Amino acid sequence: MNIFCVVRNYAPHAVEMKSAPPVEPIFFEKPHTALLVAPTTLHYPEFTQDLQHELELVIRIERTGSHIPLAQAHQYYHSVALGIDLTARDLQRNAKAASMPWLLSKGFDGSAIVSPFVTLESIGKPIDNLSFSLQINRTTVQQANSSDMLFTPSRLISHLSQYITLTAGDLIYTGTPAGVGPIKRGDHLLGTLEGRPLLTFCVI
C-alpha cells in the first residue's frame, strides 16, 4: 500500500504557501507507517513545535492499473474519505532552507490521518462536487468544494499511473484547500463531508 499526496491542488492554498499553482500534478509519498486510521486521540510529536493540519479528500485505488487513460480513471475508485496530512512545519522550513528533502516533516508515524471510507453512491454526488470542512474547537478553519481542484481525481490517477503502477489499496491525498495552520495539545478537530461528520479526535 502506497500513500501518494498531491502538492498545491487548490490555487488559494498555493498563494498562502507563497508558491505558483503547478501546471501539472506534483506528488510526494508518505511511508505506510504514516497511516493513522480514524483516531480518537492524536499524540503531539515531541520533535516539532509547529504541527499543522492540512485537510484533504482521499481516494482509495480499487484495482491495479498502469498508463490509465483519463476517460477510464473513474473506474479505479468508488469511495472517498477525509484525510489530514499532518506537517511538522518547522522541520519542513528548515529542510527547504537547506535545499534538502523534507520527508521527516511529512512522513513521520501517524502523519497521514484518514477517516472511514464512504461510497460515492451512498453520498449521492459525484466526486468533483463534494463539500468538506475542518473545525478546530468548533471554529471552521478549512472549507472547500472538490470542484475547486486544479486537477480532478481522475486526472491525478491518470497522470500518476503514467509513471507508477497503482495497486489496490493505494491512497491518494488529493490536495489541501487554503486555511492550513497550527494545532496544539487540547484541540478538538472535526472533519465533515457534505455536512456529515467523518473524522473527530483530540490532540494530547
Image (cartoon, grey):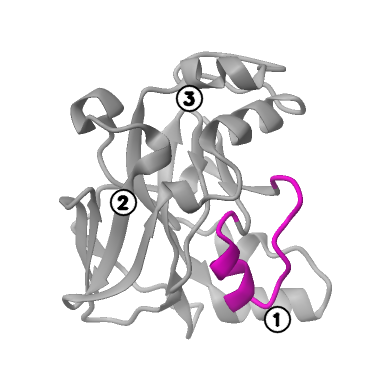
Q: CA distance from mark 2 to mark 3?
A: 21 Å
Of circles 1 and 3, the one toward us is 3
Tell me, yes or no, whether the highlighted magenta stretch contains residue 13. yes
Dot 2 corresponds to which residue? 131
Q: Earlier in the sequence, mark 1 or mark 3?
A: 3
- Label 3 SS: loop
> Which SS class for mark 2?
strand
Q: Is residue 131 above or below residue 19?
A: above
Residue that carries the numbered disc 3 in the rendered image: 61
Between the residue at mark 1 and the residue at mark 3, the CA separation in whole angstroms equals 33 Å
- Main structural element of the magenta stretch: helix, strand or loop? loop
Q: Could you tell which of marks 2 and 3 lies nearer the N-terminus?
A: 3
- Of callouts 1 and 2, which one flags the residue occurring earlier in the amino acid sequence? 1
Q: Please name the residue shown 69% across and 65% down the image.
A: 102
Residue at the right extreme, as displayed: 99
Which numbered marker is on residue 94?
A: 1
Residue 49, compared with residue 174, is above or below; it is below
Q: What x and y, as percent, mark residue 204?
A: 24, 75
- Can the viewer see residue 30? no
Question: Range of the magenta residues?
Answer: 9-25
